[in-house]
Amino acid sequence: MDNILKYIGDNRDKFIDRLRENVEIASVSGWPTHRGECVRQMEVSMKMLQDFGFDVERVDIGDQQLADGNKIPLPPILLGHLGKDPKKKTLLIYGHLDVQPALVEDGWSTDPFKLIEKDDKLWGRGSTDDKGPVIGWINAIEAYQKTGADIPVNIKVCFEGMEESGSVKLEETVRERTDFFATNVDWVCISDNYFLGQTKPCLTYGLRGCAYFNIEVKGAHQDLHSGVFGGSVPEAMVELSHIFASLISSEGQIQIEGLSDQVLPVTDDEKKMYKNIDFELERYRGEVGCGRLLSDDKTDLLMRRWRYPSLSIHGIQGAFAEPGEKTVIPAKVIGKFSIRLVPAMTPDHVEKMVVDHVMKVHEKLNTKNQVKCFLGKGPSVPWVTNPKNENFQAAVNAIKKVHGVEPDLTREGCSIPVTLVFEEVTGKNVLLLPMGSCDDGAHSQNEKLNIVNYMEGTKVFAEYLNELGKL
Amino acid sequence: MDNILKYIGDNRDKFIDRLRENVEIASVSGWPTHRGECVRQMEVSMKMLQDFGFDVERVDIGDQQLADGNKIPLPPILLGHLGKDPKKKTLLIYGHLDVQPALVEDGWSTDPFKLIEKDDKLWGRGSTDDKGPVIGWINAIEAYQKTGADIPVNIKVCFEGMEESGSVKLEETVRERTDFFATNVDWVCISDNYFLGQTKPCLTYGLRGCAYFNIEVKGAHQDLHSGVFGGSVPEAMVELSHIFASLISSEGQIQIEGLSDQVLPVTDDEKKMYKNIDFELERYRGEVGCGRLLSDDKTDLLMRRWRYPSLSIHGIQGAFAEPGEKTVIPAKVIGKFSIRLVPAMTPDHVEKMVVDHVMKVHEKLNTKNQVKCFLGKGPSVPWVTNPKNENFQAAVNAIKKVHGVEPDLTREGCSIPVTLVFEEVTGKNVLLLPMGSCDDGAHSQNEKLNIVNYMEGTKVFAEYLNELGKL
């Protein structure tokens, strides 16, 4: 392994140039005008994989129909194999090569589609999300090959180009292509999330699900003049405000009866895992910019983010939302909020508790408005895995060797729906192995990847392959 | 007077044609593309006044700067005199000749800029607001002149062409031109509102004012991902919902301490005036389309609309307001609500009570969010006059003669700011004398004026002039 790690260290500039070439392709999947660049990015990646000996299948997933009726092609999904040695086990790696939109006018200090090396960081759109990690895997493989080392596992890759736009057709493809995903896969690794902090590596073993709710409140036939009608009729916005306030206290306590019935109790083992996690409350508060946090205890705060449900109010459709002053009484408003789900909450149970609560509050408010509460599309279920399994332990060992520290075992509060799909279809363990830091600004202006994360991350990938080979 | 009333009855078709010619001018002051039509409308009106012997001054009020920087002319204000007999008293009449926007695509059954006579109604934009009443005055004057009768008062008119766009420059003009408005005016009459119901005439002696409020709540530095941050930070939308809910109960009771301190108590005399008002609760509820009203008592409900303050929540700026599902936690939201003011509430007192209340609730919510509550631009003060004065009594007598009934004495819940300006500058009584019915749809699709309202209204104007002549 020493040769391999030395090769990686010696090829810093080459690896940065490889990332640079990919960042310069403006593969913004959310911009229909740039769909050609997304397709080109997948073609460049296909060529790169082939250059390293991969057997690559380009899966054509058809067209996307735009709101204006026009059709544009979807970028293909790449399914690649490197090695089919029946004596070796197989790792499936997922990554994506499309990026979020980015414009200098949004407040970037540099051209987002140039990779700028400055202050030991690599600035550019996609540097950390997710081109850096994808290229990191290629770099690790190159290190094995160029040093004449045998890669101790077979590798499969699944790279897509629509992740930032809802991973169109990915789930269908994974479910259809059982030949690729359900056979000859022993472990899955996704490197598409971030360290909890800026420097200490972590492995992620849980994600929350999400249930999105709409509360529709209808008062009058049509919007009313507040001068002429104000004071005489129950108003939809007043009722919605009362319903919103009934959902959650200002201190973040969800007030929906029965909602948390299914939440698994915290075990002692679990609590212990939080103890050593590198996380500073005051630093987090400062970064978020809020006046206080909802807990002053590290473990409690992290649990509120990861392993307890949370409720957020997102907005209202149908009310006045522009700058200025409008005096209308909106006739119909739709309030929107979501609940993050944790094991073992089910969307069905959550839906029943929420709807019961809202309708009970509505009855009590005695407005005789028409109120409907309903679950939005596609609730996602929570995911948690046992971080003591061999896939995680291989990564723990790899990180210990490269960084000299035991990684934090973390969960995330958000959803990465593809995680569950891979787990379900492969029937194997999925590891979330982040390369970037918490402050990389994945979807923000001035996205960056620290050079140290890129280089050490590549080494971790190489060590992880080696550790898997021992299993 | 019999000759005059007979002349009006005999000239139905001519008067409808006169209204038709004016409705066909698409004088939409809110459409910059149609500003030429607004100017033409004022020129046509000037010519019409001159044809009836008015001495007309065209007051040029300059240009309007559009958001794109372009300038377009403002339609002139017309100041006209008919008769300057020092032995006669003088009535000042206000009216406007611009209209609200209207498109067939909005749901009109007919071309809004053609006057369609159907089902005893005159359909078309401006038929009731406010071209019908303005032309009604002209018709009444014609009836005097063509029957050889002497008009027993001098008449001044003030016609504008920007009423539907905030009466740009009207207040300044009235305040500057004291030569016209502050001297030789004995009464003022505005015919720009509506019957309380469909058939019974009314006179309006009070209007509410309005104070618009913004509540700005700032949580984090920037919008947050609800998966990543949900559960750990106090959210601006949650706090705003609690503040909104604290302002008013679902049954319309304002919960702001001290807000109603200045509201004048109801007198017995006042209560009596409500007794005979022609108003059916159930019919009103059906027209509005709400499930219930905030009171089951006629007098109480009307008082809630006219002589008590009301509070309406209009919307939120900065939160998610589109169709679909967005899971962001908005960092900064601005809640908007307004309070209708009644005598003797002052904007200063109301502002203090509202801000105190909001800040007290904010403290209690303990979010450490940054909260600001502030009064919006241009609060308007309430207006009420004594309907027993001679100007109102002249109109009461006129209506009794034409309709055979005593008009209801009503107030309105909304503001007509120019009323106060005329009262203040002239120092005389202002009468609001409506021509149209409650269901005319002044700012809606399919605006109409009942032919009976147009014809009887013209007769009321003629009788009113006659009654004023006796004073």
Image (cartoon, coloured by chain):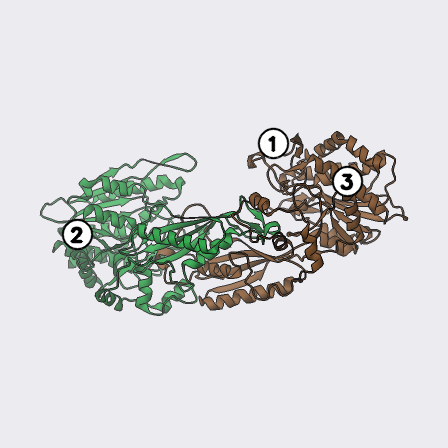
Chain colours: A brown, B green
**Amino acid type at mark 1:** Thr
* Location of mark 2 (residue): B144
Q: Chain of mark 1?
A: A
How would you rate the neighbour count of disc 2 (Cα within 10 Å): few for under 14, some for 14-19, many for 20 or more?
Answer: many
Kindly indicate whether the residues beneath marks 2 and 1 are on one polypeptide chain: no
Q: Residue at x 47, y 55 (%)?
A: B365
Q: Residue at x 18, y 40 (%)?
A: B179
Q: Chain of mark 2?
A: B
Q: Position of residue A390 (x, y in %)?
A: 80, 52
* Location of mark 1 (residue): A110
Say whether residue A463 is left or right of residue B67: right
Q: Residue at x 38, y 51 (%)?
A: B355
Which is more N-terminal, label 1 or label 3?
A: 1
How would you rate the neighbour count of disc 1 (Cα within 10 Å): few for under 14, some for 14-19, many for 20 or more?
Answer: some
Say whether residue A92 is left or right of residue B117: right
Secondary structure beneath label 1: loop
Q: Nearer the viewer, mark 3 or mark 1?
A: 3
Kindly indicate whether the residues beneath marks 2 and 3 are on one polypeptide chain: no
Q: Is residue A96 above or below residue B339?
A: above
- Checking the image for residue A402, the label placed there is 3
Secondary structure beneath label 2: helix
Question: What is the residue that sits farthest to the right in this orientation?
Answer: A87
The image quadrant that residue B343 belongs to is bottom left
**Amino acid type at mark 3:** Val
The foreground one among A102 and A188 is A188
Q: Is residue A242 above or below residue B324?
A: below
The foreground one among B39 and A303 is A303
